[in-house]
Amino acid sequence: MERIVAAAGGQLRTVPDIVEAAPFWDAAAVVLLGSDIRELPPRRRAPAVLVGLDGDGDSLWHLAAAIGAERVAVLPDAASWLAEYLNRSRAPEAGGLVLGITGGCGGAGASTASAWIAQAAARLGARVLLVDGDPWGGGLELALAAEDAPGLRWPDLAEASGSIDPGQLLDALPVAGGFSFLSWPGSRDRPAAVDAAAVAGVLDAARRGYELVVLDIGRGREPLRTFAWDCDRIAVVAPAQLRAAVASARLLHELPPVETALVIRGKTGAGLDGSLIAESIGLPLQGIMPEIRGVTVATENGRLLETGRQRNVRRFAAEVLDLSRKDR
């Protein structure tokens, strides 16, 4: 940590426990908490970064969620990202918002919702990036009929490290439906590994280059850890069904401590009441995602964005976009 802070041009003050940390906590530019610490000083802000080691395993993520840490840095892999993060914290730049979308259960429709939201925001004139966070999802570019669009995909960024110029990223990414997108290739090849440090660097550049980043997180544990912890806000999509509500409630334990809301898919009157579902899960209800006839076929045929032009879809997307505008 001394080397990382020095590389960022900062000064590191270390204390062994919470009692000695309390007098300096609120005055510090950034609070870094080691994974050996299990509590916070009373009435103090949450730490900016929880720092741990590869060997910490699942306990690191559970601790981060419990104490409300804004970011997680697993060393040594995240050393370059953390140095860049600390450097920017000394001279913060204006940046966009990263809105994560994830399914409360399998087949909830998170990818469809992500594309509709990105399309709606672009239609309003925002500079938008849609990010495919699921390497095993088959490639979001196929649903956009944009597999031949020129530009970088995730495997092209696998070796990215350190700071990425936002303007260069914007120029290098493909465009569909009026917004940029970053997808896994829509091919049968095994997805190339992209480590968390590379993802963090890409998303940091995206935050500085776009007004809104819509991140289709995916549901596996690794996508959640790799992508969800860079989100400023999260929307959980769940069908209006009891089993989906139970699965969504379980998912909350894996999400970072950021503002999170629920999106119900379907006609809630035919199953469960949307407000009751939201109350049972413990999330505010942000919107109702409409059931569009033929959306599955449209997605398979690369015509997902055509369905996004319907009035009820635009109304739904506007409801979710309200989540991205709060306090901004």
Image (cartoon, rainbow, N blue to C red):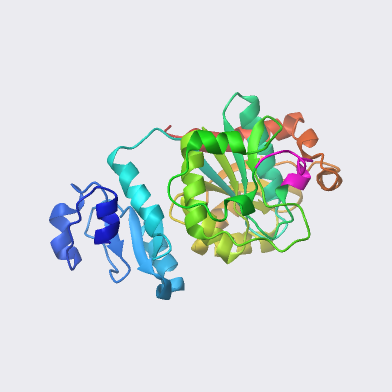
x 71%, y 32%: residue: 177
Residue 139 visible from this viewpoint: yes
| Horizontal relation, residue 232 to residue 11: left or right | right
Q: Where is residue 122 in the image (x, y as percent from the top left)?
A: 63, 29
Quarter of the image that includes the N terminus: bottom left
In magenta, the rendered stretch is 141-151
Residue 282 visible from this viewpoint: no
Quarter of the image that includes the C terminus: top left
Q: Is residue 298 magenta?
A: no
**Relative to the observer, which residue lies in front, 232 or 66?**
232
Q: In this view, does 156 lie above or below 121?
A: below
Q: In this view, does 300 lie above or below 58?
A: above
x 30%, y 55%: residue: 47
Asked where in the image residue 38 lies, by quadrant, the reply is: bottom left
**Relative to the observer, which residue lies in front, 48 or 150?**
150
| Horizontal relation, residue 56 to residue 290: left or right | left
